[in-house]
Amino acid sequence: MNLVRKFISLFFLFGVVQAQESMEVLHEDDPILKRSYLTVRNVYIQGNKITKPYIILRELELKKGSAYSISSILTGLQTSRQNLMNTALFVDAQVDFTNWYNDSLDLRVEVKERWYYFPLPYLKPADRNWNVWLNDYNLNPNRVNYGMKFIGRNITGRNDRLNAWLINGYTQRLALKYYNPFSDNSLRHGWGVDVSYARNREVNFNTGSNKQLFFKDPDQFIRQQFYFGGLYSYRKGSVTRHYFRAGIQRESIADTVAALNPEFYGAGVTKVVYPEFRYTLHYYDVDYIPYPLRGNLVELDLVRKGLGGKVNLTQLSFTWGKYFKLPKKWYWSSFLEANLRIPFDQPYFNQLMLGYNDSYLRGLEYFVVDGVAGGYIRNTIGKEFFTYQFKTGLSSKTYSTIPFRFYIKGYGDVGYVYNKRPSLNNLLNNKFMYTGGVGIDIVTIYDLVLRIEYSFNQLNQSGLFLHKADARN
């Protein structure tokens, strides 16, 4: 495994060197451009059939009636387009200046709006990822969720969202969510509501050999979950967002599940009801949130479950990403996620950590690692090697072509998870983990990112993995 260690070390070192070499002096830094000022007379917006003009104006760095240096205008145009694209409201957005006369000019904003309403059939495996469904369960159709999902974005033109789920199959689920990020005249305060109910006939009751262990009862639902909560958000500028959530969670399992694992909820308990409080900070100063190539992102998540009763958890999660744009369309990224849960004595359902959702090491997708403290670092170097415009044949100006961007990449990941009481056969707990590999990323409209990766790990295993992602990690 010396080859694996050398591979990962090479990517760490190369990332630092290339990041230093990428620091270029921008033309906007020219002293003459910093001393010359122009006033923005008017802002003209085109293409917004649903989106309110003031929602677009909010994202612009340059405001009507204000004076800016030419340097600030050049950078402001780029940042304004970045902000508009990161709203997830538009397929494309352009911000340019026009009508430059003496010491003033106009701004022209042209946007191409997305489709905002999607009443879609829902068909998705219930397993953690497609690879597990294929490799461990041979594409078993009984492990599929199906139904209808209504997605409404920008329903009043203020970037508000209404989602309704009616799901059957492996998990039966009803859910309704509404979020309005700009509910006041200052366009800083928002609110939301979330209610959901789910039940299963099969439950992941424990972990063995770093694999999920399941129990199924075809005659009854053996786990039920209900949640109701509210959300308040605050966003003053364009890159920093604050979210405060409060809700009530009710969960229950059948007696058979508690008998198989008395520590599922702890002490053989079969039902828990607890309040949940959450504060989340998002700092997204990147060029494009779903697939950033330049900038920084930080996420901080503080969760409190329970008030000292059967459920007693305080969790702190921290995410950091750094993205460098290198010469000749090369890119480098470092992405870190860390978690701490106290007290360390937690029931099983509060210990799920690596291998769930988007928290995993590339090459260890078939495994889960439970614990109360730990995290991982992903390092990736990539290059855009191909772009393609697919002609749809539609007369729509927005959808006459669909762009595709292709990136080739190499990567190395490291991680560690601490578990106070690891079982003997969960061999990845309390150990240094490392993986690496190569792959291709495909990026297209509607924030769709497909990742095709060939990875290997410290267990001398390798394989091809497919992921659909919302962010480049």
Image: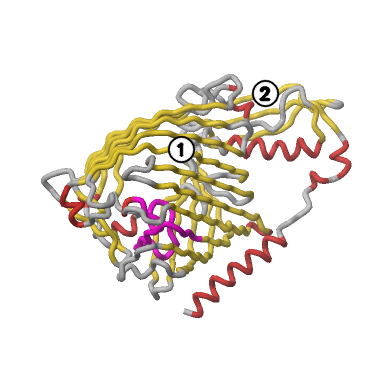
- Residue lying farthest to the bottom in this orientation: 2
User: Is 190 rendered above or below residue 406?
Assistant: above
- Give the residue drawn at x 77%, y 49%: 26
Q: Around disc 1, counting alpha carbons within 10 Å, would you say few (fewer than 14), some (14 to 19), or many (20 or more)?
A: few
Residue picked out by circle 1: 393
Q: Give the percent coordinates (x, y) of residue 445.
A: 49, 42
Q: Is 382 left or right of 97, judged from the image as shown?
A: left
Q: Are marks 1 and 2 in contact (CB under 8 Å)?
A: no
SS at badge 2: strand
Q: Circle 1 sits in a helix, a strand or a loop, which is it?
A: loop
Q: Is residue 390 magenta?
A: no
Q: In terms of secondary structure, what is the magenta stretch mainly?
A: loop
Relative to 49, is 265 above or below?
below
Tell me the tag on residue 44. Answer: 2
Distance in Å between CA atoms under marks 1 and 2:
30 Å
Residue type pointed to by label 1: Gly
Amino acid at pointer 2: Tyr
Give the residue at x 54% y 34%.
Answer: 90
Of the pair 384 and 117, the residue shown nearer to us: 117
Give the magenta range. Answer: 350-376
- Image disc number at residue 295: none
Asked whether 351 falls inside the magenta stretch, the response is yes
Q: How is the image coloured?
A: secondary structure
Outermost residue, top direction? 185
Q: Position of residue 230 (x, y in %)?
A: 42, 30
Q: Is residue 165 visible?
A: no
